[in-house]
């Protein structure tokens, strides 16, 4: 996030409206595994669904990016983290043979 701050701030100072996006696949897999292990150790804990793991990842990464950018940007250009939802086609044949842990 720190390496991103200066180039993004330069774009904002030149009048650009900037949108920074990120991937989160590896992080979601880690969060899911962590939640599964926690539930094994403490069965009273609720299992986390994929949607919650994605939200956890988006929130964490968004916070890290926003925090890294906030010091470099003027107050009127304060960064905002936005969580999104994804819609998938459940009968898609690709779900029968996933290529990743999720």
Image (spheres, grey):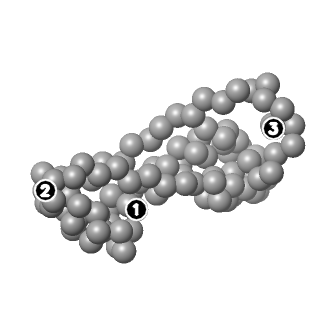
**Residue 69 to residue 101: above or below:** below
**Residue 101 to residue 72: above or below:** above
User: Which dot marks residue 94?
Assistant: 3
Please indicate whether residue 30 sits to the left or right of residue 3 in the image: right
Please indicate whether residue 78 sits to the left or right of residue 76 in the image: right
- Label 1 vs label 3: CA separation? 32 Å
The residue at 21%/52% (across/down) is 16
- Label 2 vs label 1: CA separation? 18 Å
Residue 68: which quarter of the image? bottom left
Q: Which of the two labelled residues, at mark 3 and mark 2, occupies the earlier sequence position? A: 2
**Residue 90 percent location from the top left of the image:** 74, 27
SS label for mark 2: helix
User: Which dot marks residue 75?
Assistant: 2
Give the quarter of the figure containing the N terminus. Answer: bottom left
User: Which dot marks residue 64?
Assistant: 1
Residue occupying the far bottom of the picture: 3
The residue at 59%/41% (across/down) is 52
Foreground mark, 1 or 3? 3
Please indicate whether residue 64 sits to the left or right of residue 29 in the image: left
Binning the other alpha carbons within 10 Å of mark 1 as few (below 14), some (14 to 19) or many (20 upward) gives some
SS label for mark 3: helix
Q: Is residue 23 visible?
A: yes
Q: Which of the two labelled residues, at mark 2 and mark 1, occupies the earlier sequence position? A: 1
The residue at 12%/51% (across/down) is 76
Residue 98: which quarter of the image? top right
Q: Which of the two labelled residues, at mark 1 and mark 3, occupies the earlier sequence position? A: 1
**Residue 35 percent location from the top left of the image:** 68, 52
**Residue 95 to residue 20: above or below:** above
- Label 3 vs label 2: CA separation? 45 Å
- How many numbered discs, if any? 3
């Amino acid at each position: 996030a720190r390496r991103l701050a200066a180039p993004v701030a330069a774009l904002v100072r030149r009048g650009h409206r900037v949108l920074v996006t990120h991937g989160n696949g590896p992080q979601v897999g880690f969060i899911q595994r962590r939640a599964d292990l926690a539930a094994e150790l403490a069965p009273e804990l609720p299992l986390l669904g994929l949607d919650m793991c994605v939200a956890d990842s988006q929130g964490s990464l968004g916070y890290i990016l926003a925090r890294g950018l906030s010091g470099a940007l003027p107050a009127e250009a304060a960064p905002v983290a936005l969580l999104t939802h994804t819609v998938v086609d459940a009968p898609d044949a690709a779900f029968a043979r996933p290529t990743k842990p999720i």
